[in-house]
């Protein structure tokens, strides 16, 4: 199970722009074994992996089920970041399905969970900084819902968060580009940029591999 999870993770980072079906197969195997053994963390990792694969290769109604399964299982986890991760997964999925109200609710719920536990200071969880991941999508949702002022507020918070765990050059470039996009009311472009820089290097101090 552990070796298969490691293989799936490697495939995630070495696909050179492609989404190999072997990644989906590996995570499916991990989920099967983890479910049989009632391994909650590996089951969550597998569901996240299948969801991540699906965002690039499967219909969103299909991956919505994966996000919902993750949320249900996360309730059994002792890690407070897991439910927040599930909310973010649901928020992103609903955003692309066109349910912006539901997306806003789950993305804001993810941030509220992280803020309430202090767990948001953990740099990487399920390959992403969960605070940055949620805030990178929330401005898009707010903009689509006709709330440009609120979207700008989230951008301001995101500029601060980008400086945590990132190299100064990357954070500075992202913040400057975000400011230019916001100044021209290009919320979609700015949040798109932020989505590209939320992945923190696994080798960074304090980073977690799960």
Image (cartoon, grey):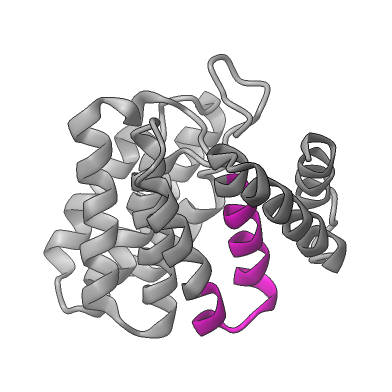
Q: Nearer the viewer, residue 107 or 189?
A: 107
Q: Quadrant of the N terminus?
A: top right
From the top left corner, tell me how far across and down residue 32 is, in percent: 71, 56
From the top left corner, tell me how far across and down residue 133 is, in percent: 43, 49
Q: Find out whether residue 59 is within the magenta segment.
A: yes
Q: Is residue 79 left or right of residue 38?
A: left
- Most extreme residue toward the top, as rendered? 205
Query: What's the residue at 65%, 42% (across, down)?
Result: 37
Above or below — where is 199 with respect to 106? above
Query: What's the residue at 53%, 16% (across, down)?
Result: 206
Residue interval drawn in magenta? 45-63
Query: What's the residue at 68%, 54% (across, down)?
Result: 31
Most frequent secondary structure within the magenta stretch: helix
Q: Nearer the viewer, residue 204 or 120?
A: 120
Above or below — where is 139 with respect to 145? above
From the top left corner, tell me how far across and down residue 6 is, in percent: 79, 38
From the top left corner, tell me how far across and down residue 132 is, in percent: 40, 43
Q: Find out whether residue 64 is within the magenta segment.
A: no
């Amino acid at each position: 199970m552990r070796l298969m999870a490691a293989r799936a993770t490697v495939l995630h980072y070495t696909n050179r722009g492609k989404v190999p079906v072997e990644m989906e197969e590996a995570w499916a195997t991990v989920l099967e074994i983890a479910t049989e053994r009632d391994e909650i963390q590996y089951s969550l990792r597998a569901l996240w992996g299948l969801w991540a694969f699906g965002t690039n290769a499967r219909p969103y109604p299909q991956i919505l089920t994966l996000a919902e399964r993750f949320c249900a299982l996360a309730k059994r986890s002792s890690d407070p970041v897991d439910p927040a991760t599930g909310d973010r997964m649901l928020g992103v999925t609903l955003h692309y399905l066109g349910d912006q109200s539901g997306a806003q609710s789950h993305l804001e719920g993810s941030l509220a969970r992280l803020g309430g536990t202090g767990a948001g200071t953990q740099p990487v969880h399920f390959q992403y900084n969960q605070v940055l991941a949620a805030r990178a999508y929330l401005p898009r949702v707010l903009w689509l819902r006709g709330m440009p002022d609120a979207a700008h507020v989230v951008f301001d918070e995101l500029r601060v968060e980008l400086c945590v765990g990132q190299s100064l050059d990357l954070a500075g470039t992202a913040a400057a580009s975000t400011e230019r996009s916001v100044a021209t009311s290009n919320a979609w472009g700015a949040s798109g940029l932020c989505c590209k820089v939320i992945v923190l290097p696994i080798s960074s101090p304090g980073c977690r591999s799960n």
